[in-house]
Image (spheres, helix red, strand yellow):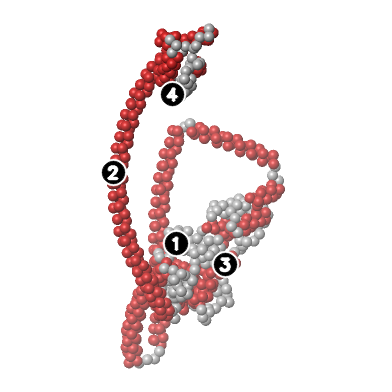
Amino acid sequence: MGLTTPQSKDRQGFGKLSMSKPHSGTSERKTSFFGKRMSNGTARTSQYGAFGGTEKIKDPRPLHDKAFIQQCIRQLCEFLNENGYSQTLTVKSLQGPSTKDFLKIFAFIYTFICPNYENPESKFEEEIPRIFKELGYPFALSKSSMYTVGAPHTWPQIVAALVWLIDCVKVIGFIAMSENPVFEEPQMGEQSENGIDFNQLFLDYTVRCYDQFMEGRDTFEEYDADMCIRLKEAYHVDESNLEALQQESRRLLEEIERLEKEKENEPDRLASMRKLKVSLQADIQKYQNYLTEIESHSTLLEQRFGISHDQTVGELESRAVQQENLRLKNILDNQKYSVADIERIKYEENELQQTIAKLTKDLDEDKQQLWSEELKYAKMKESVETQLSEFHKIGRKVRLIPPTAEYANGYDFQIQCNLDSEQSSLIHYRNKINVPLVEILSQSEGQIAGATNKKMGVEDMVEQLNTLIGEKKNEVKVQKDEAQKLEETYQQKVEEAEEDEKRWISEIESLEKHRQLLESGVNKSLDEALKDLQKEHILSQWHRSYLIPPIVSSSPALLYGWRGGGGGGMLKECSRLCIRIKRALIPGLYHCPMSNGASYCLSGCSWWSIRLKKR
């Protein structure tokens, strides 16, 4: 709030408790409270959180910068000296104060806020951090830092907190002494510096929106709509005028679209504007570099001002010492001592000065040694904390922490040790953890031995399986060779079968040709036989009509046999004809029943003629 870094030049703020410019402070407060809200919509995510959040905040102040710490010490020294602190303090005396001096300084500053406050007789290491937390200090102060206030690694945090407390006191004094309080209700129609009418209507709207903002909201549509309606009613807004403004807005939007189209049609202008933009960016970079140089120069001037201020303080102290010397010299001149007494006093004074010088030297050496020991202690503490963190991490990894872990067996292996406490000791934790760890280690060794034996058995089994697998691979190889030989034999047999099949096909084709030739010959003989049968049939019909015995054939031999009275000759000829026809017939036809078992042929083989006609 009033704290500035060495890079900042604006040190106006609220000033000191005298507050010589109340009007400017009031206007600045009013602007920061009501104005410029929308310029930072994410204010709740800043370094101070949303007023009391539990998230750990990183301190943005340069606490490791010596110039910044010296500036804080000067502010603290000025505040204490200007407001009547019981002792006269210098910047040098505040480089590393003791815990007792810190308690006095804190009590003196805090009495401006709480006049009845007194330092607690015990447990101040808990009381002071609690007070800072209640006041809203955004960074936590540890209990251990209260024991080593003047240590190099602790004092920067403490002095920054004290400066923050001084700023709180200045704000409270400013509000109490201001002629125009910030939170009083403004008059109706009163206008602020930025032109906003701070009437009751706007104040109510701001308060309601701020309440919702603190609850986590970022938009306030319903309040905006209600505010718009109430403002229209308050200022008698004409709706027709609004419609005209909307039409004007639409016209302007159309004009913007037209200009954008013209812009697209003018690439040269765009290129020139881009060049101008690059030139302006270069100028901006130059101005930024110039501002950086100005800020560094301002920082150097502030440091010189601090040195001159220290010189002024030293001159004032020198004058005070000179006045004290004059007063003592006057007293010495007025008192009645002999020369021997004066010589003895001078001798004792010289001895005391030598003793003081020796003690001062010893004190400086002790302070330097104490400083180095504190640094060693801080490094050792950090190392121990790192080792404890690593121990807890490994314990969680091997499932020994917490006590309900898988391998903890109900033992608590966590080390909760406050290294800043004088009563803390690691021997207790060593005795507490060593025995359960030895027990768990013995159990683990037994389990490891069992697992090793099991592993050896599994390895033997794997070796046997590998041997069997090798044998099976050899057998598979032999079987593959035999299968390959059988495959070759099979291919050879297939080729031979294909050759035999081709040979058989050629033989079948030749036999088929022979069969066709035989069928053609048989068909020819059959045609001749059919012709003979037709003739014989005609003759038999003729003989029947004239009661002449049937004649099978018209050949002279048959006719001769019949006329000679030899019936056996005709039967013999008929049988020959039947045998001839039987041999010539296609397989499947019936044989002549007239010539089998009969002494002679009565029908003249008409049966054959009938069957042949049906075929």
Q: Which residue is mark 3?
A: 172
Q: Residue at x 42, y 45 (%)?
A: 281
The numbered disc on residue 587 is 4
Q: Which residue is mark 2?
A: 485
Q: Earlier in the sequence, mark 3 or mark 4?
A: 3
Disc 3 crowd, CA 10 A, few/some/many (<14, 14-19, 20+)? some
Label 3 or label 4, whichever lies nearer to me, is 4
Quadrant housing residue 179: bottom right
Q: Residue at x 37, y 73 (%)?
A: 445
Q: Amino acid at mark 1?
A: Thr
Q: Earlier in the sequence, mark 2 or mark 1?
A: 1
Q: Residue at x 44, y 69 (%)?
A: 399
Disc 1 crowd, CA 10 A, few/some/many (<14, 14-19, 20+)? some
Q: Which residue is mark 1?
A: 5
Label 1 or label 4, whichever lies nearer to me, is 4
Rendering coords of residue 91 (x, y %) = 42, 71
Label 2 or label 3, whichever lies nearer to me, is 2
Of helix, strand and loop, which one carries label 4? Answer: loop
Of helix, strand and loop, which one carries label 3? Answer: helix
Q: Amino acid at mark 4?
A: Pro
**CB atoms of marks 1 and 4 within 8 Å:** no
Q: Amino acid at mark 2?
A: Lys
Q: Disc 2 to disc 4, how far (Cα)?
A: 50 Å
Q: Is residue 339 visible?
A: no
Q: Nearer the viewer, residue 322 or 141?
A: 141
Label 2 or label 4, whichever lies nearer to me, is 4
Q: Earlier in the sequence, mark 2 or mark 3?
A: 3
Q: Disc 3 to disc 4, how far (Cα)?
A: 140 Å
Disc 2 crowd, CA 10 A, few/some/many (<14, 14-19, 20+)? few
Q: Nearer the viewer, residue 351 or 537?
A: 537
